[in-house]
Image: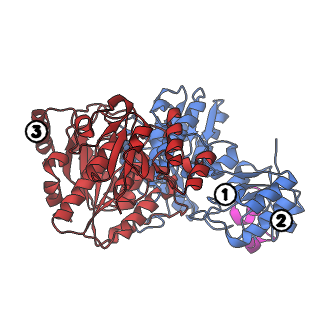
Chain colours: A red, B blue
Amino acid sequence: MKQRLLILADGSLGVFNSKTATCLIRYRPDEVVAVMDRDHAGQTTDEVLGVPAAVPIVASLEEGLKYAPDTLVIGIAPAGGALPAPWREWIRAALEAGLSVYSGLHVFLGDDTELAAIAAAHGVEIWDLRRPPIEQPIAHGDSRGTRARRVLTVGTDCNIGKMVAAVELAAAGKRRGMDARFLATGQTGMLISGGGVTLDRIPGDFMAGFVERLVLEHAQADLAVVEGQGCLLHPAFSGVTLALMHGALPDAMILVHHAARSIMRAQSLPIPPLAEWVRRYEDAVAPLHPGRVVGIAINPYGLSEADAQAAIAAAEKETGLPAVDVVRQGADRLLDAVLIAR
Amino acid sequence: MKQRLLILADGSLGVFNSKTATCLIRYRPDEVVAVMDRDHAGQTTDEVLGVPAAVPIVASLEEGLKYAPDTLVIGIAPAGGALPAPWREWIRAALEAGLSVYSGLHVFLGDDTELAAIAAAHGVEIWDLRRPPIEQPIAHGDSRGTRARRVLTVGTDCNIGKMVAAVELAAAGKRRGMDARFLATGQTGMLISGGGVTLDRIPGDFMAGFVERLVLEHAQADLAVVEGQGCLLHPAFSGVTLALMHGALPDAMILVHHAARSIMRAQSLPIPPLAEWVRRYEDAVAPLHPGRVVGIAINPYGLSEADAQAAIAAAEKETGLPAVDVVRQGADRLLDAVLIAR
């Protein structure tokens, strides 16, 4: 059933972290009715985000309600996940107007007594995407046994395009008639696919277990493309990355790289060469399963067309692997590489 | 202040996972008044566990209460952490007898309405060691800046002696007059030291952040020895291990190996050679901090004295690093290696 989504993205459009808004508009284009961002009100998302859909940007919640949304989606994910103070009033107003609220924040809106009471009174839902399930599964390496070919996207930093690469790879498989699934492991991916698990909210002992369970749910597909998280060298999130690798035990990995970035965000580490990342990702999983990096997804954000093409050519030369910009070129060449990998 | 601990270890004594009982008796010898285990009632822990303290083993809770304990410690940690059904009655009886209860189970006893009410009525405490703190710290690599020399114990498998090696290394430092601290990251370590964090219960995004915060609390010590968790090749727990490494950014690592074990527990993976582990652990942290593996702690469980000595000699020959059994020989040679490492 189609929804009518109003995305709350105040202050975040047009910057690199407007991931939720950009991805929902790109992958659920018929369902986003408006975006609220006071900084860009009056423009369209086509102009501001460069995605091919002319969704209006409004300056207030009241204005957004004129587009008859049924759901408010919280469209930011700040480090640490806390709720910016002014947003609380908008969420309250949305619930009172009869909208459900979907949130990927670390703070659970459903645990806010006042907000929960308003939602109950209006018969609408608060969906906290990051709320961990109560189960406590332990990984046993069972992902190895799937009929589905398992693919994981990995990266040279955080917030770099691993989800988009996974969505596009699954889409390429579907276009060829395969039963290809996108397995979401983050809140934006869950908003796109309607399922999955928000891995970063799971207690450490069970992270790999939840990934394994998610993979086994799709064991009979042709292709299970798992959304990557974090990066093996990011001091805060590397543990999530490794748990994901050992939970999924991929047959093939796609290395995602933001070509314009030379220093890892949130620290001063220069990004190592692509070939070193290929070695590092393969080595981290090798004794458990011989998963190989089979292709490179170049994120061209911030580069001219010519520079993006040069970055793609350089990545191919350095690694000997196919490299593409999955958004502009599609993921077909990466899919070809995946299909000969096992 | 000294406590009077009654350890509930029913059915777990004399098997390899009686870790909590063994470690509390070894490291808080004056405070354990009795252990309950129907299988070994009438013997002493000296006979059953081989630790040099003659703590009585009793067959029932009632009998344990005769030793005037003030605290019941739940002395098992089953995979997944669920509470075995019969234990609930004993916990209830202990609370009703005025004992506090310390639990490292994944299931939180304090969330059990009935048990919480009994504790409140008797003015005693339920301490769920694994309950995650509410803060949400993100790691930034700041551990690098400590005055304290940072050491982390790492292993060739789970449940192998990483905590004991860390406790013994800190004790060796104290004996030389250093301000040497043991930083606990698991529930048994917390029971020994009275502080720390149960890392495996922390959501993925904040694991490294909590480790970093713990390390920074001890930044001005001479030596901060961090208790390791899991193992880089265990499919379920590797993410916890890497988060710990990147949160602590150790100057030196001690590799702990159970010499009698050739296959990793809970999976069929043969344990790689020690030299391969040294390479793997150093490689996983190298771009962030040049931490080195400087010594090997051999866990001789299940070996004869002669075989243990042979395993120690073989480890030294293979790696070129000092190897010791920290329980029988002390950790002085490992401390020497740590002190020249930075």
Q: Is residue B50 left or right of residue A110?
A: right
Residue B284 image point, x, y percent: 37, 44
Report in which chain the residue with disc 2 lies. Answer: B
Circles 2 and 3: CB atoms closer than 8 Å: no
Q: Quadrant of residue B193?
A: top right
- Residue drawn at (64%, 60%) of the image: B107
Residue B197 image point, x, y percent: 60, 44
Give the SS element for disc 1.
loop
B134 or B165: nearer the viewer: B134
Q: What label does residue B108 carry, if any?
A: 1
**Residue span colored magenta:** B38-53
For badge 2, the amino acid type reads: Ala
Report in which chain the residue with disc 1 lies. Answer: B
Q: Quadrant of residue A256?
A: top left
Residue B285 image point, x, y percent: 39, 40
Q: Residue tagged by mark 2?
A: B93
Asked if the magenta segment contains residue B44, the reply would be: yes
Do the residues at pointers 2 and 3 share their chain?
A: no
